[in-house]
Image (cartoon, rainbow, N blue to C red):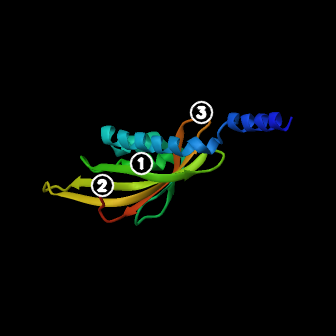
Amino acid sequence: MRLIASLIAILCLVAMPARAGDDALEQMLAADKAFAAMADAEGAPAAFAAYAAEDVRMFPEGGLPYDGRDALIARFASWPDGATLAWTPQGGASAPAGDFGYTWGLSTFTVRNDDGEETVQHGKYISIWRREAGGAWKFVADMGNAAPASADN
């Protein structure tokens, strides 16, 4: 009888669904990679507008924080022609409920001045993500700043 009870207990444990947070980090990293791919294909302004939550809070380097997707879009209106922002997620963590977490990574901003000289700035970032009601991941906060160049950026 104990053997049967033990086997049933083991089967119940094996059959238990994974915690919601177990897959969330993979999903956030996939969203961050898709976000970066969109920035590469369509430009950073379009990508940030597409992946930002309505209530996003941005923390620009050297500036005061600002709130809202509309403010983010307005700030990107002055994005330099031909400038690129590329990034590679490196890791992150998720809440046990699987609906909130962060990703972090390394970035490279490239812009040409009026004389055609290219300036490259390396950085690091952290993005806070929330799963929206429809299941899509949107970032609710984002901050990046300068970092030395590395093999990954």
Mark 2 closeness class: few <14, some 14–19, many ≥20 residues within 10 Å: some
- Secondary structure at badge 3 equals loop
Callout 2 secondary element: strand
Q: Is residue 58 above or below residue 132?
A: below
Q: Residue at x 37, y 39 (%)?
A: 38
Disc 1 from disc 3: Cα separation: 26 Å
Residue 152: percent from left, percent from top = 32, 55
Q: Which mark is residue 74?
A: 1
- Report if residue 103 is visible in the image: no
Q: Please tell me whether mark 1 sits on a helix, a strand or a loop.
A: helix
Q: Which residue is mark 3?
A: 134
Task: Give the crowd class for mark 1: few <14, some 14-19, many >=20 residues within 10 Å.
Answer: few
Q: Quadrant of the N terminus?
A: top right
Q: Residue at x 81, y 33 (%)?
A: 4
Three-letter amino acid code of the residue under disc 3: Gly
Say which quarter of the image contains residue 114: bottom left
Q: Residues at badges 2 and 1 in contact (C-beta under 8 Å)?
A: no
Instruction: Name the N-terminal-most of marks 1 and 3.
Output: 1
Left of 16 or right of it: where is 50? left
